[in-house]
Amino acid sequence: MLIVRFLSQDANRPAVGVLDAETVTELPVASVGELLGLPLADLRAALAATGPAHDAGSVRLLPPVDGRMEVWAAGVTYQRSREARITESERSADVYDLVYDADRPELFFKSASWRVTGDGESVSVRTDSGIDVPEPELGLVVNRHAEVVGYTAVNDMSSRSIEGVNPLYLPQAKIYLGGCAVGPGIRPAWEVADPYDLTIELAIHRDGAVVWSGETSTSLLRRKFGELVGYLFRADVFPDGVVLATGTALVPDLPFTLAAGDRVAITVGEVGTLTSTVVSGKQALTWLANGR
């Protein structure tokens, strides 16, 4: 089962539903944010509601974030991420070593819901950056009550060349139009037996060939999910819930960089595959800035 946000052929507004096999069953809620306003037990009950049924092939999936939802991310949660950040950093490499072992995790804002793209849509590379890469991550879907209710795939796009100059440039390296993709849907938490044993795969296709690929597992995470969520909610509230990306362990070696036209595929075991086409600059994403 996947909780999905979608657009059907006969509707002029997005709907929320449950994708099971080849059928999407519409739910009587206005948004994903409305679902995430519920306690976990009530959310599970809400998914049992029945509504109009749609053939899965006739709908267009949208990113499963909306309303006041936000996407946040955790950094340096895998050994590989620590090594990559140290390698790319021109100064202050010890910052990444320190945060990897510190009690407090690195957490940063990634995207407002309206900036997020979904499966089959686009991500962008900045025109003022020389080295840009996707970062495949398991996303925790957390309700307003700080309960992990599901999992999704996240592409935390990153400019390695901007962040490498100075860690204080992290927001510019991470937060921009086309810098975040989420999807294809939300796998309910109770359907995943062990979220610390999920494979994460990344494949980058260029001109019909795979130019970079890798595989890792959430078993290599340095942090526990409860710890990350606890710090995120310590001094903030998320009325419509939040997606928290848990960090990456798949980082292409320097000087690899994405190029316009590349296709990025991120597969998270038991969750699904998130695909994106790479474009260059914000002008290629005016459709996103202007609304769907």
Image: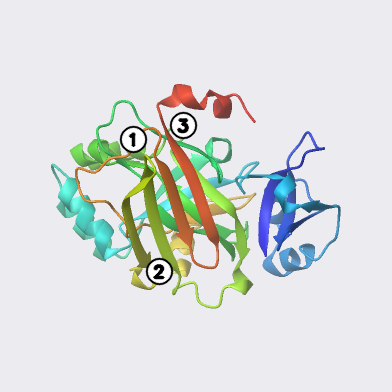
Few, some or many C-alpha atoms within 10 Å of disc 2 (few <14, some 14-19, many ≥20)?
many
Position in image of residue 96 (x %, y %): 22, 54
Task: Point out the tag, 1 or 3, that comes first from the N-terminus.
Answer: 3
Q: Residue furthest front?
A: 208
- Residue type at the position of mark 1: Ala
Q: Residue furthest bottom?
A: 193
Residue positioned 56% across, 51% down in the render? 183
Task: Point out the tag, 2 or 1, that comes first from the N-terminus.
Answer: 2
Distance, label 3 to label 2, CA atoms, is 28 Å
Residue positioned 74% across, 46% down in the render? 58
Quarter of the picture containing the C terminus is top right
Residues 80 and 140: in front is 80
Q: Which residue is mark 3?
A: 177
Position in image of residue 197 (x %, y %): 44, 74
Query: Is the residue under label 2 in contact with that under label 3 (CB below 8 Å)?
Result: no
140 to the left or right of 134? right
Residues 69 and 178: in front is 178
Look at the picture and state if 105 lies above or below 265: below
Residue positioned 15% across, 54% down in the render? 94
- Residue type at the position of mark 3: Leu
- Residue type at the position of mark 2: Thr
223 to the left or right of 23? left
Look at the picture and state if 271 lies above or below 119: below
Q: Is residue 150 visible?
A: yes
